[in-house]
Image (tube, rainbow, N blue to C red):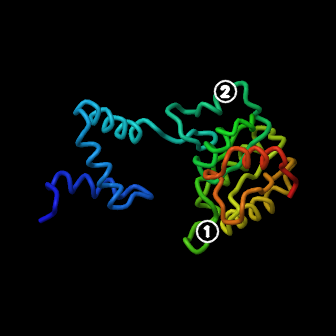
Amino acid sequence: MGVYPDALENCIQKLATFPGIGAKSATRMALHLLRQPEDVVREMAKAMVEVKTMVRLCSRCFNFAEADLCSICSNSKRDRDVVCVVENVGDLMALESASIFYGVYHVLQGSITPLAGIGPDDLRIKELFSRIRDNNIKEIVLALNPSAEGETTASYLLSRLEPMDVEITMISYGIPMGGDIKYMDMQTLKKAMMTRRKP
């Protein structure tokens, strides 16, 4: 028999499944929920269900969206000739919060990771090549994480992009090897984007 009532124990166990949330943090969160008015908790639960049922992937760039296109792809003020390639939506959000890039994005939904059995066909790479061919893209900015997986993905993309009629640049790395774009401070991201270079 647990220390807490079954319903509370169940809530703690469910909260502990979130990334970075251990048993202690999950317990604090569950106890916090108990102290909230019922309508606040219902709104929270509703928001969690809605995020699962209403959010999907943008049909063009694979960012999160509620409509067919995300807010970036449907924004007529963005420069559609320049596409920034990122590994995941967290990286896209970090670059957007730095307010330095005014093109559009392409989210690969991961990186090439042979040890985990993730190859080029498991990512949104074919869709990237189709976008380049069909939309007269002028520049591809590779903004991949400075990790072994990011480097492998960048090398693969460079080898496939080279024959295409498109300028290829990479963000500069004030980002340490093994770092993660979504956790970088805004100044580092701004500098990396502003000083992008040819590979």
Q: Amino acid at mark 2?
A: Asn
Disc 2 to disc 1, how far (Cα)? 33 Å
Horizontal side of 198 relative to 13 (left or right) equals right
Residue pushed farthest bottom?
115
- Tally the marks: 2
Identify the secondary structure beneath mark 2. Answer: loop
Q: Amino acid at mark 1?
A: Thr
Classify 10 Å Cα crowding around label 1: few (below 14), some (14-19), many (20 and above).
some
Tag 2 residue: 75
Tag 1 residue: 113
Instruction: Give whichever of 60, 142 is nearer the camera.
Output: 142
Residue pictured at 70% horizontal, 35% vertical = 99
Residue pictured at 28% horizontal, 58% vertical = 13
The mark nearer the N terminus, 2 or 1, is 2
Horizontal side of 113 relative to 37 (left or right) equals right
Give how far across and how far down residue 24 sits, in percent: 33, 59
Residue pushed farthest top?
76
Instruction: Give whichever of 67, 52 is nearer the camera.
Output: 52
Give how far across and how far down residue 183 sits, in percent: 61, 52
Quadrant housing the N terminus: bottom left
- Residue 192, compared with residue 75, is above or below; it is below
Quadrant housing the C terminus: bottom right
Give how far across and how far down residue 62 sits, in percent: 59, 44
Residue pictured at 33% horizontal, 55% vertical = 26
Classify 10 Å Cα crowding around label 2: few (below 14), some (14-19), many (20 and above).
few
Q: Quadrant of residue 198?
A: bottom right
Residue pictured at 62% horizontal, 66% vertical = 119
Instruction: Give whichever of 157, 78 is nearer the camera.
Output: 78
Instruction: Give whichever of 43, 164 is nearer the camera.
Output: 43
